[in-house]
Image (cartoon, grey):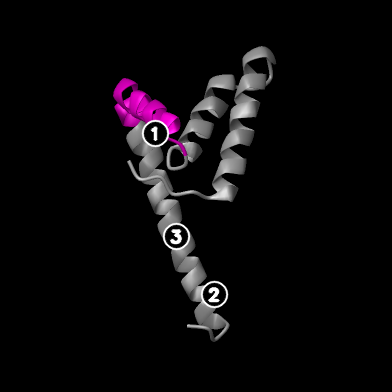
Amino acid sequence: MDIRPSATRKAIGWSLLVLGVLGCVLPFLQGFLFLALGVFVLRDQHAWAARGWGWLAQRWPGAVARVEAMEEGLTRRLSDWGRRARRMLGRA
């Protein structure tokens, strides 16, 4: 397990967890969805979240694989966009 601290990821992850808890009691929020997304975002930040993500991966391996593939594609696409922007601005 590789813990990579990031204040931004922690803030986003904890916000999603709070929305998930609220979603468990409010009828118009999908609580489990926000809880799962919060654990996904925090999986590189905290050991307990990495264990939780591992449990989700065992329970729903296909869904977890699709989410991780989407994250990889988005990361690659954002990296390409950043590289192009730096080239356009002459900072390559």
The label nearer to you, 1 versus 2, is 1
Pointers 1 and 2 in contact (C-beta within 8 Å): no
Q: Residue at x 50, y 67 (%)?
A: 81
Q: Residue at x 62, y 15 (%)?
A: 24
Q: Residues within 10 Å of mark 1 (few under 14, many from 20)?
A: many
Label of residue 87 in the image: none
| For residue 75, side relative to residue 85 (left or right) | left
- Position of residue 15 relative to residue 89, above or below, is above
Residue 53 picture quarter: top left
Residue 61 drawn at (x, y percent): 30, 28
Label of residue 50 in the image: 1
Residue 28 picture quarter: top right
Q: Nearer the viewer, residue 79 or 2?
A: 2
Residue 26 drawn at (x, y percent): 70, 15
Spatial CA span between label 1 and label 2? 33 Å
| For residue 41, side relative to residue 58 (left or right) | right
Q: Residue at x 43, y 29 (%)?
A: 48
Spatial CA span between label 3 and label 1? 25 Å
Q: Residue at x 40, y 52 (%)?
A: 73
The label nearer to you, 3 versus 1, is 1
Label of residue 85 in the image: 2
Give SS at disc 2: helix
Spatial CA span between label 3 and label 2? 12 Å
Which is nearer the N-term, disc 3 or disc 1? 1
Which is nearer the N-term, disc 3 or disc 2? 3
The residue that label 3 is drawn on is 77
- Position of residue 49 relative to residue 72, above or below, is above
Magenta segment range? 46-63
Q: Which SS type dominates the magenta stretch?
A: helix
Q: Residues within 10 Å of mark 3 (few under 14, many from 20)?
A: few
